[in-house]
Image (cartoon, rainbow, N blue to C red):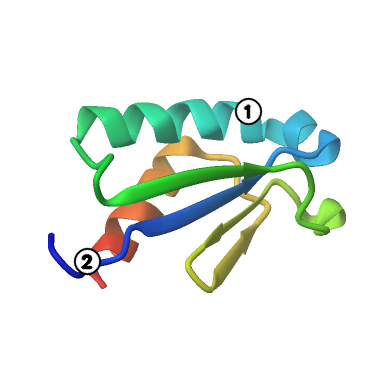
Amino acid sequence: MAGKEKLRVELCMGSSCFARGNAGILMSLEEFVEQNGLSDRVDLEGHLCLGKCNSGPHMTIGDKEYSGISDPDAVADIIRKALEE
């Protein structure tokens, strides 16, 4: 994987997004990355607040923003597609 940057996945872990389910999304993402051997390709980051409280849970992958995410399977699909790009 020489010369390729890791896919940067940022999750808001502020109280609003956390209460709306990002804690579960984070656990699912960590599990997905581990089970698929993607730790060298995906960098998961949590932030205290990404400023999108009204539309959370919020996640950013690269330069794309996702709001209102709640389904761990859908998030795994988003990660798969982002890795293919």
- At mark 1, the secondary structure is helix
Whether residue 67 sits left or right of residue 76 in the image: it is right
Kindly identify the residue that appears in the image at 33 percent across and 58 percent down: 6
- At mark 2, the secondary structure is helix
Q: Would you call the spot at circle 2 few (<14 residues within 10 Å), some (14-19), or many (20 or more)?
A: few
Q: Nearer the viewer, residue 4 or 10?
A: 4
Residue 50 on image: x %, y % = 76, 55
Q: Residue 82: which numbered mark, if any?
A: none
What residue is shown with label 1?
23
Q: Total number of numbered labels?
A: 2
Residue 22 on image: x %, y % = 64, 35
Q: Residue 84: which numbered mark, if any?
A: 2
Q: Quadrant of residue 84?
A: bottom left
Q: Is residue 23 above or below residue 78?
A: above
Looking at the rendering, in which quadrant would you find the N terminus?
bottom left
Which residue occupies the extreme front position in the image?
3
Residue 45 on image: x %, y % = 54, 45
Whether residue 83 sits left or right of residue 15 in the image: it is left
Residue 10 on image: x %, y % = 56, 52
Q: Would you call the spot at circle 1 few (<14 residues within 10 Å), some (14-19), or many (20 or more)?
A: some
Whether residue 30 sits left or right of residue 49 in the image: it is left
Q: Nearer the viewer, residue 68 or 63?
A: 63
Kindly identify the residue that appears in the image at 47 percent across and 44 percent down: 44
